[in-house]
Image: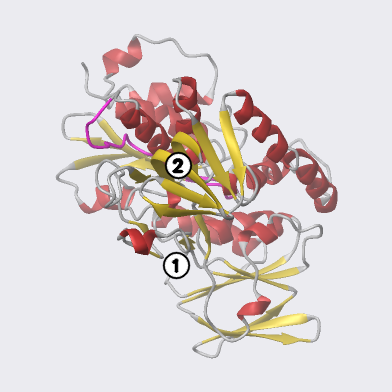
Amino acid sequence: MTKYDVIFIGSGHSCNHGGIMLAMSGKKVAFVEMGKIGGTCTNYGCDAKILLDGPFEYLDGLKRYEGLCVESDVKIDWTRLMSYKKQTLGVFDPILEKLFSDMGVDVIRGRGRIKDAHTVEVDGTAYETEYIVIGTGQRNAQLQIPGKEFTHGSSHFLDLDEMPDSIIFIGAGIISMEFASMALALGKKVQFFEFAPRALMAYPQEYVKKLVEKMESQGAVFHFNEAVASVEKEGSQYKVTSQNGVFATADYVLDATGRVANFEDLGLEELGIKASRKGIEVDDHMRTSVSNIFASGDVVDKTIPKLTPTAEYESNYIAAQILGILDAPIVYPVIPNLVFTLPRIGQVGVSLDDAKASPDAYKVVNIPWGVQNDWVNNHETDTDVNLIFDKKGYLVGAAIYGSEAGTWLDYLTLVIDKKMTAADLRGMIMSFPTQTYMLWSALLPHLKMM
């Protein structure tokens, strides 16, 4: 029987970062993977979305200058863009397998199942190991309604050779809003059915309202407070009906009502490891109830946002424990969160809604960024920034509506996490004239002096 120091069940970000760290430290490591090497984000999710999003971001920016200095009719060819996406991402699987192998990590293809605390079986072959890390991620949830077989998940949408002329999105969360931004830019008909009273419930209401209004101006129709009851096929189209009787038809239906953990058929129940659709239960060291078996990433039942960066952070944390580098409970730094709509909505730290609800604890500084900085903000006049400070003057949160939200959030995350003061910022020199410089300047008057 082949013996390893650590076997990871999965090869995505929740596994490969820690696995490489362990292998480079001299440990014998293996990844067990039943799908494509690199996992969901690399092959079916984040990377595909950001690649496809690229030209739409430029198109959205160009449209802001129409009538001012640009007279053009630029169009995106989705079919050619998808061909480029498949060509680019299609090589990741073999490239990553070779990369991991070159770094000393074995890749075992097949479905992994834990037989006991120190044995992982892959399609009938047993492997012995000192530690096991479960990083099997999540998959698309699916409404259990009549006609569910007519709906599709996010991975299917991100592989469409042709964009449908009309789409119904079940749910108005991150996935639906991001995908709809692209469809609307292509002039497609878009409708949403959302059981909640508004879209993107976890994000600042004032920014979500602005985004919804922009989408409506592009032709989107939102049905809020409408839970979907059924999907029926009518000729070449599909009819979606809510529990209240509201209905609509379209060429394509995307079910984006959430994601569920991949915990089934791993042998967890036999080992007494608790798990549910929410994920695998772990302690504050990312250990399951079996002390040498860890879980990492989206498969974990946790309140921390299930994001690629948090999965990577947990993977490295587990590796450090196994190596004996640290033994303290996991402590997460401040985590930025971004929706890749057009424009972006981003937030980090204390939320805008929470800050406004607690005026005695926080000071909110609103900056109508696009109006004040039009000359350096690429004529994106509706850009808005809210900076949140505690009573000592430290930056503790931020919310941004604008195309550059991701870049700004990364900068502000550093300021928050390191408790930087105005003296710290004045000790730095920024490139000029840039939007980051303007953000740096905007922070200075409000931050704690030193």
Q: Give the quarter of the figure containing the C terminus.
A: top left
Residue drawn where x is 78% and y is 67% of the image? 165
The amino acid sitting under disc 2 is Glu
Report x, y in % for residue 94. 72, 37
Upstream in the sequence, badge 1 or badge 2? 2
In the image, 447 versus 304, the foreground residue is 304
Q: Is residue 272 magenta?
A: no
Q: From which residue to which does the magenta span run?
A: 326-345
Circle number at residue 117: none
Q: Is residue 119 left or right of residue 145?
A: left
Report x, y in % for residue 362. 21, 41
Q: Residue 88 sits in which quadrant?
A: top right
Report x, y in % for residue 135. 46, 47
Q: Is residue 421 left or right of residue 96?
A: left
In the image, 34 versus 336, the foreground residue is 34
Read off the residue under disc 1. 198
Circle number at residue 128: 2
Residue 405, visible in the rendered structure: no
Q: Is residue 332 magenta?
A: yes
The amino acid sitting under disc 1 is Arg
